Image (spheres, rainbow, N blue to C red):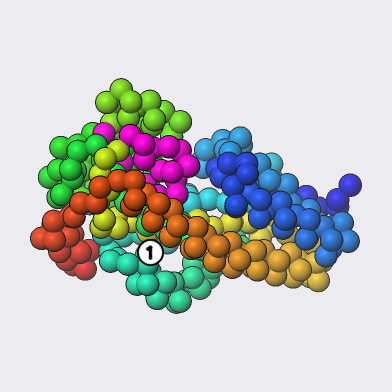
Amino acid sequence: MAETEIKISTLYPPGSDAVRSLTELSNSLKEKTAGEVVLKVYPGGVMGDDKTVMRKIRVGQLQGALVSSGTLDLLDADLNGLSKPFSYDNLEQVYQQRLSYDSVVSDKLKSLKWYGFGPLDGGFSYLMSKNQINNMEDIRQSKLWLPNSDQIQQISSELDIDYLVMNIGDVLTGLDTGAIDTLISPPSAALALNWHSRFQYLNDTPVLYTWGILIVPERALARLDVTTRNIVTSELEQWSKNLDARSRVANQQALKAIQQLLSPINFDQNDLDRIRLSQTE
């Protein structure tokens, strides 16, 4: 029996690169700590939604979670600096900002007594639709689905758009029945969940940069001696760097794949300029 078991929850499904990498990390931790520390992963959302998972971490049922950036709103971390809608033209602009912003993320979480291992690249989300969407008014007239989070609620309010609320597992049915006809998603997710097969158009303007992070409360590692704790945090930091690099490549490949399957359309430049101007005011 391991002396310390670190239980990690994630929405990533079994077999995904993220989950496989965590399994490899568990083996490495067990070896380098002589069996004192192992990682146990609960994939596919079996531990519940973000709020449920955070509650389980607080009571000690879980010791961490691999989550999307929006989950950090539950910590009042205010780390949305990379996720303003329509802020970027290309990923090079994002990666340039990340050169300084990654440390902002870890420092902020540290001030809240959490370890943060990331960010982990999620690529851009793009607008996919059954009908042509060329401007904000088209979006407002569409039957739009977005994941219902505090961050999305804030963004939809800022842009004055409405969206339909349904579970991710019901999105495909919603597309088939016509309950929804438009969504905003990273290409990797759209391909994995087969959403792309229900659409004809891909708007080639990046909407939102997405990223994830592995969070662990400091108290979850407090029982470890300093040497062992340093081994664990060092291994987690190296894991996050490796996964981030692999994810950048995989997300670019997913974008290229979906660009070959859907017809590209452009977003109105005047609307784009107005949105960006409002974010600087």
Q: Residue furthest front?
A: 260
**Percent position (x, y) of residue 239?**
65, 64
Side (left or right) of 174 relative to 167: left
Q: Position of residue 60 (x, y in %)?
A: 69, 45
Residue extending farthest to the left is: 270
Q: Tell me the magenta residue range.
A: 181-198
What residue is drawn where x is 45% and y is 38%?
A: 193
**Front residue of this view, candidates 233 and 23:** 23
Q: Which residue is mark 1?
A: 82
Number of other residues with Cα within 10 Å of mark 1, as a class: few under 14, some 14 to 19, many 20 or more = some
Q: What percent of the width, then of the height, locates residue 150? A: 37, 46
Q: Is residue 53 visible?
A: no
Does 97 sit above or below residue 176?
below
Identify the amino acid type marked 1.
Leu
Q: Is residue 45 above or below residue 98?
A: above
Residue closer to the observer: 20 or 2: 20
x, y percentage for residue 13? Answer: 58, 41
The residue nearer to you, when weighing 110 against 163, is 163
Q: Is residue 155 left or right of residue 76?
A: left
Q: Residue at x 49, y 70 (%)?
A: 102
Total marks in image: 1
Q: Could you tell whether 32 is left or right of 44 in the image?
A: right
Q: Can residue 121 be seen in this snapshot?
A: yes
Kindly identify the residue that appears in the image at 50 percent across and 58 percent down.
250
Quarter of the C terminus within the rendering: bottom left
Residue 51 part of the magenta-drawn span: no
Q: Label 1: state its secondary structure.
A: loop
In the rendered view, would you say 144 is above or below 223?
A: above
